[in-house]
Image (tube, rainbow, N blue to C red):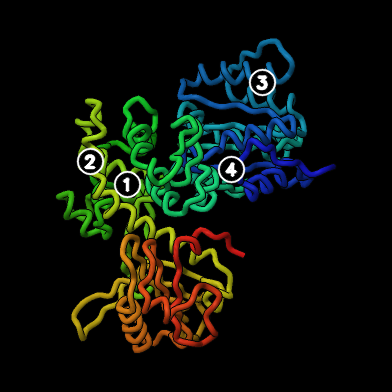
Amino acid sequence: MEPLVKPDRVFDREREWEGLVRFATSSSPDVRLGIVSGRRRQGKTFLLDALAEEVGGFFFTATDATEVEALEGFGAAVAAFAGGGRYAFRDWDEAFERLFAVVGDGLVVIDEFPYLSKASPSLPSMLQRAFDPRGYARRANSRVLLCGSAMSVMGRLLSGSAPLRGRASLELIVKPLNYREAARFWGIEDPRLAVLVHSIVGGTPAYRREFVAGDAPASLADFDSWVLRTVLNSQVPLFREARYLLAEETEIRDVALYHAVLGAISGGHTTRGSIASTIGRSSTDIGHPLSVLEDAQLIVREADPFNRGKSVYRVAEPLLVFYEAVMRREWTRLERGNPEAAWRNSRSTFLSQLVGPHFEGICREWAMSVGPEVFGDLPGQVAAATVNDPRDKKQIQIDVAVLAPEETGQPRRILSLGEVKWDRTMTLGHVDRLRRARELLAAKGYDTDRTVLTCYSGAGFDENLRAAGAEPGERSDGADVPMLVDLNAVYSQPH
């Protein structure tokens, strides 16, 4: 059998496609169930629909409906796949029996499965029986993909004592496009413009296709106009998307509290204590909201590699940060159709408080993607960190700390310490600060013999630093020469 070629209409997603094709075409009797999840708008349905079309499989998208309505829709879909007629199922047991008889050894895709399990909580148990040695799916030799956007629900399908635990041979999470692929998807070649756009819409494919109808900024000069005609335009679906992202999560009850938590994190209050203090709650009160947001992959918790037990929270979806820091405070003006005044009031906040931290995240992603020739070894961990300086009684912020994989019985090797500036020309003073941090970490027992001091800049480097530094891959091994990473380097494809 010739390998299935990914349709041209599916952008990128090479690894995801390969995994799905392996599952759909496997002849192994142990390959029966696959779980596909990911936040909304990432193209899961688009990808799975293309797969089902290529292999001639059954595809059904559930809606938020009662069990009776869901069975009626499912019956119509099975009948259509079978070639016509009408199936009226009494229950899901009968529905699955007929489905697997019709599909045989083909592929079944059930999209938005959480809607079905919400209306019929016993559905996972019924599917478990279908996969038993004498079950309908096993006898028919069918393969089933369950897909959903409710991350907390999908995560529970295979956890603990869940009925389907141990049954899945594929667990695929469809994530946003990385920053390089996002720039290519939007057709943006200018890396500065790419960072600005990514700081708002991230790597979510639907935001270009359905939500702004393909409208992309033509140049840096067009960026402000693009913001006004898309994300700040109340007539465009992207305008209210950030609000819907929270409303669609089934675990979220008190939406105002969750917005307050996201607003605090977006405003730079990233520790649990500072988040609680900012919104006027105790640390205990915000434990559940933080867990729910983490399960929904709307926020991530990152450990500080140099301070055991200390971690910070970051909002994973740039559009949410933009909404909390820019749109929420200007909502009245925006709804009244005055986006120009709202953007005039907020543009400086966007550039200073959003783009800078976002660029730091992009630089961390770059550091994690490079080959061993850049830092002398493949990174094992990349994170933001702090180094306590008792002499000067302050903390040195490390925007990009790159550590080698841990080795038992050996000091942890630090491959690089980096500082990031989006809108400021970097100088030798930034290198001196990193050098001081390296000395302090060496005194704490870290292996810093070959630690690269790295400056990441969106605005460039002054003459003295440029004369003393080198670009990625050009440093002589072991020499204490700072590495200079500019926008072009960050957006260059890794080798």
The residue indicated by pointer 2 is: 344
Residue extending farthest to the right is 1
Q: Amino acid at mark 3?
A: Val
Q: Which residue is mark 1?
A: 321
C-alpha separation, residue under disc 3 versus residue under disc 4: 21 Å
Q: Give the left or right position of residue 67, taking residue 439 as reference.
A: right
| Image quadrant assignment for residue 224 | top left
Image quadrant holding the C terminus, namely bottom right
Q: Position of residue 205 (x, y in %)?
A: 51, 40
Residue at position x 58%, y 75% in the image: 373
- Three-letter code, disc 1: Val
Q: Decide if residue 258 is in sight here.
A: no
Residue 78: give its label: 3
Residue 394 relative to residue 123: left or right: left
- Judging depth in this view, the residue of 489 and 333 nearest the camera is 489
From what the image shows, is residue 44 above or below residue 434? above
| Marks 2/3: CA–CA distance | 54 Å
Q: Residues within 10 Å of mark 2 (few under 14, many from 20)?
A: few
| Residue lying at the far left of the rendered structure | 280
Question: Mark 4 sits on what residue?
Answer: 35
Q: Nearer the viewer, mark 2 or mark 3?
A: 2
Tag 2 secondary structure: helix
Q: Quadrant of the N terminus?
A: top right
Q: Is residue 308 left or right of residue 123?
A: left
User: Quick check: can you spot residue 28?
Assistant: yes
